[in-house]
Structures are given as structure tokens and as C-alpha cells.
Image (cartoon, rainbow, N blue to C red):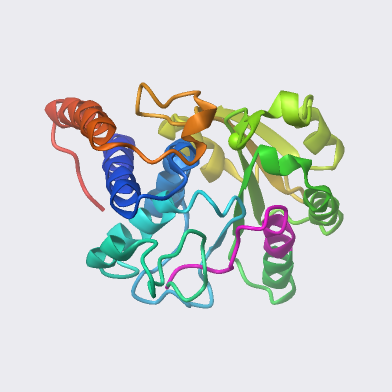
Amino acid sequence: MEIKALQAKAVEIRMELLRMIHRAKTGHTGGSLSNTDILTALYYRVMNIDPQNPKSEDRDRFVLSKGHSVESLWAILADRGFFPKEELATFSQFGTKLIGHPNNKVPGVEMNTGALGHGLAVAVGIALASKRDGKGYRAFCLMGDGEQAEGSVWEAAMAGAHYKLDNLVGIIDRNRLQISGTTEDVMGLEPLEDKWAAFGWHVVSVDGNDIAQLVEALEAAPAVAGKPTLIMASTVKGKGVSFAEHVPHWHHHVPSDEELEKALAELSAKLAAYQQEGPVSQL
Ligand SMILES: [Mg+2]
């Protein structure tokens, strides 16, 4: 998918996830809006995946280590055809597969996540298995910035560099907020890029809500042979909804009827603007 189509798709995904959260009356709104562009770039352009054959041996693997921000992932997996879109209406309802965190009963999900700090270690194992089996598939892992306070992230970072896993890409959704405030107030992380570089990773910094920059960085990996890549994706929590942006309270705030209507109006206007620029091609 071309860049403009990806941008338009990300707006549609944001609208879908807001409807899901509003309907279910639960969800992680801010983080899902924050990571939507990253997931859109991965699932519609970068990763080698086949929704009709989700267990294909040669597929690229994705681990959403910040598992709470799952609504964008559910909307994307449904839209890509991993499961019927109608199932999105069951999000967070009793008996659904689409619970509030990724779980591997859902086609396209590699790993149950939600307990923070575990995803990267598994992605390291996946990338190592790919190398040892002589396969070409890659492992992508999206982490939160609040998650960087988990010690297990850094054990995995060491292992990724030690095993020279240049088929491994870690991405940090660097929105500078976590559930209880700013990351720098809760547990200072800076200089975060220097820390990853010191752990032996090739570090690339991008605007994580700019799909063109994300695609360029993701498609360039591995830019350095023998090193895993860390993409520091500077994002805005609540991105795309003016009154949710940068507001910690929207971490798991459920939009009211009025807020939903306002948010959808803003996003519809953005979508219309993309469409006015010319036809938006699909996959
Ligand atoms: Mg965060």
C-alpha cells in the first residue's frame, strides 16, 4: 500500500477503535491511538504476512509487548481479513476471543501479552530460531515507553545484540506518558536512545505518527549487518483526537457519546481531506 493510502487507512482504524471502545465501555484509548500509525505501516506494507494462512512458516512475526493497546491491533487484524469484521462488535464482551489484551486464540496473534516486559524476550527467541533454521523471517516487537522501566526488557536487549539478531526490530511507542503520568516523572528513561545504542542496537529515531518516516525506517532494517534495530518512534498519546492528545487521563478513558461524535467528526474531516487529494488505492 502506498503512503497516502496508509495514512487514510490509519484514520479509518482510529475511527473503528474508538467505536469499539465506546461500545464496550472499556479500553485503552490513548495508547491505541498512539500506536495506530506504527501498526498500519507494519500490517499493510512492511511485514510478510498472509491472513489466509496465518501460521505460514515463513511469515514475519509481530509481538505487541504493550499488550494493553490492543484495540488498534484488533481493528487491523479484522480489516486485513484474519477474522470477520463483525467480530469487532464482541470486543470485551463475555465469551469473546477479542479480550482486552492480545491472546493467541485470535488468528494472527503470536503471543499472549499484557504483563509488560515479556514481549521482547520472546521476539529475541523468534529471531534466533529464524537464524538457526536458516529462514528469512523477521521478528518485530512493539514496546511502550513506560515498559522500559521493566528490567527484563534490558536482559532481552542484551541477548538480541549478543546473538547478532539483525532480523529483529524493536519499536518503542515513545509517547512520554504512562498510566500514572509522564515517563520522566515516574521513572526517568533518558538518554533512552544512548542506552539502546550502548546495548549494541542500531538506533533510528522517527516521528512515530508519520507513516512515511516509519516505512522508510522499517524497510531500511537491517541497516547494519549483525545488529538488531531499535526504532524510537516519537508519538502522541491520543493522536488524531485533538482533545485526547497528550492527556494522561485518556490512557483508558472511554469516550462519552458526545466525545465519540466529536472525535469521529474530526477524523472524518481528515479522511475526506486525504480522499480529496485523489483516489486512495487499496491493497
Ligand atoms: Mg507511553
| Left or right: residue 100 compared with residue 269 | right
- The magenta stretch spans residue 52: no
| Left or right: residue 249 compared with residue 114 | left
| Left or right: residue 82 compared with residue 213 | left
| Left or right: residue 218 compared with residue 254 | right
Of residues 110 and 133, the one nearer the viewer is 110
Of residues 49 and 272, the one nearer the viewer is 272
Q: Image point 67% across, 58% down: which residue?
A: 115
Q: Image point 84% across, 56% down: which residue?
A: 159
Q: Does residue 237 sit above or below 64 in this rendering?
A: above
Of residues 158 and 36, the one nearer the viewer is 36
User: Residue 161, image x and y in percent?
Assistant: 82, 51
Residue 208 is at least partly visible in this image: no
Of residues 170 and 253, the one nearer the viewer is 253
Q: Image point 44% across, 29% down: which residue?
A: 210
* Image quadrant where residue 277 sits: top left
* Image quadrant where residue 182 sits: top right
* Image quadrant where residue 204 sits: top right
How many tags in the picture?
0
Q: Does residue 272 sit above or below 227 in this rendering?
A: above
Q: Image point 26% across, 36% down: which residue?
A: 260
Quadrant of the picture in which ligand 1 is shown: top right
Q: Does residue 123 sit above or below 151 in this rendering?
A: below
User: Residue 157, image x and y in percent?
Assistant: 80, 50
- The magenta stretch spans residue 115: yes
Dominant SS in magenta: loop
User: Residue 116, image x and y in percent?
Assistant: 68, 53
**Which stretch did the figure color magenta?**
107-124
User: Residue 164, image x and y in percent?
Assistant: 80, 55
Residue 98 is at least partly visible in this image: yes
